[in-house]
Image (spheres, grey):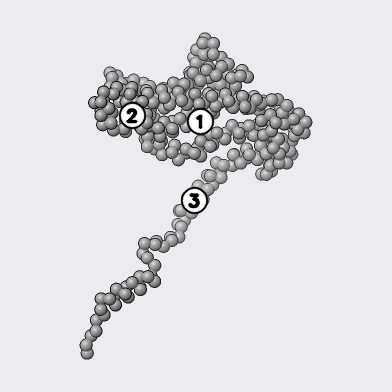
Amino acid sequence: MTATLPGPSTTHADEGTTSSHRPTRAIRRRQRPSAGRLFAWAALILVLLVTLFPFYWMLRTALSSNGALYLQPGNPLPAEFSWGGFKRVLGLASAEEIAAEGGTSGTLNFWLYLRNSVIVSSVITLGQVLFSSMAAYAFARLRWPGRDAVFFLFLTALMVPPIFVQLPNFVLIRDLGLLNTLPGIILPFLFMTPFAVFFMRQFFLGISREVEESAMIDGAGHARIFFRIVLPMSWTPMLTLGLLTFVTAWSEYFWPLLVGRGEESRVLTVALGIFRSQTPQTGPDWAGLMAATLIAALPVLVLFLLFGKKLINNIGYSGIK
């Protein structure tokens, strides 16, 4: 008997036909989720719900009628849905509407307080980012006697509770005649903080010295190198530091309360506390207070939504644990 071997063309054709009907091995089979993975997802969802619940409750209270809140305290939905809280905060409600919903008769000059908060937070952020970056560059790049010892002493300020410096700062601002002014609120936080200097120094240490040495060969000094080369390369950590500083300045309460109690210098956090203390007929105006708090928190929430991922990445990159 004579064995007949298939020709090369037949073999390739069969392989091509078989491979066309057979799923590729590159496609991985879906694996069934393990018990540990399911538990991790359940725990993550639970933490997310617990974290978001206060924001939901704040929104629910803001959209309720203030008088109905005392009759339906446990209702998960808005009690007698109403925009009255937002209208009272923004100064759009009439005296009859305020009385009908049991709101506070006190006034809240929301736009003035919002303007003051924006000015204070923005100026503090710009000042801290600039001056802290300059100090961090000096600690990271310049060589001078006692640099490391001075940096160590500078970092020890992180262990000093902020309340300890409130009284000396208050005496200084009083002697300068800056009580009840926006500069009086801004000055103690304007220049730098140990955390900001440490944060930027960690980034500057990672920049290659070759770029700076090349600029020095061309005749550039430290000031020109810093403003023309280092700062353009550092906009990402500076953005992160600016976001952290802005949020901290925006939520500051005790120092603005101590220094800026006047109407023209009052910031939003202090105004909310005063609004809370005003008592209408049935009790505190919880709907109006939650509406004002929600509006005041929107800028910070928007910033975190826009730059939250970049913030986390840069904190990890800078070596802060």
Q: Quadrant of residue 313?
A: top left
Question: In the image, what residue type sits under mark 2?
Answer: Ile
* CA neighbours of label 2 inside 10 A, class few (<14), some (14 to 19), many (20+): some
Mark 1–mark 2 Cα distance, whole angstroms, equals 28 Å
Label placed on residue 41: 3
Badge 2 is on which residue?
229
Q: Quadrant of residue 22?
A: bottom left
* CA neighbours of label 1 inside 10 A, class few (<14), some (14 to 19), many (20+): some
Badge 1 or badge 2: first in the primary sequence: 2
At horizontal 26% and vertical 80% (from top left) the residue drawn is 6
| Between 51 and 304, the one nearer to me in the picture | 304
For numbered disc 3, what is the local secondary structure? helix
Q: Quadrant of the N terminus?
A: bottom left
At horizontal 46% and vertical 53% (from top left) the residue drawn is 37
At horizontal 37% and vertical 34% (from top left) the residue drawn is 318
Badge 1 is on which residue?
247
Label placed on residue 78: none
Residue 286 appears anywhere in the view: no
Residue 184 appears anywhere in the view: yes
Name, please, the residue furthest toward the left: 2
Name, please, the residue furthest toward the top: 175
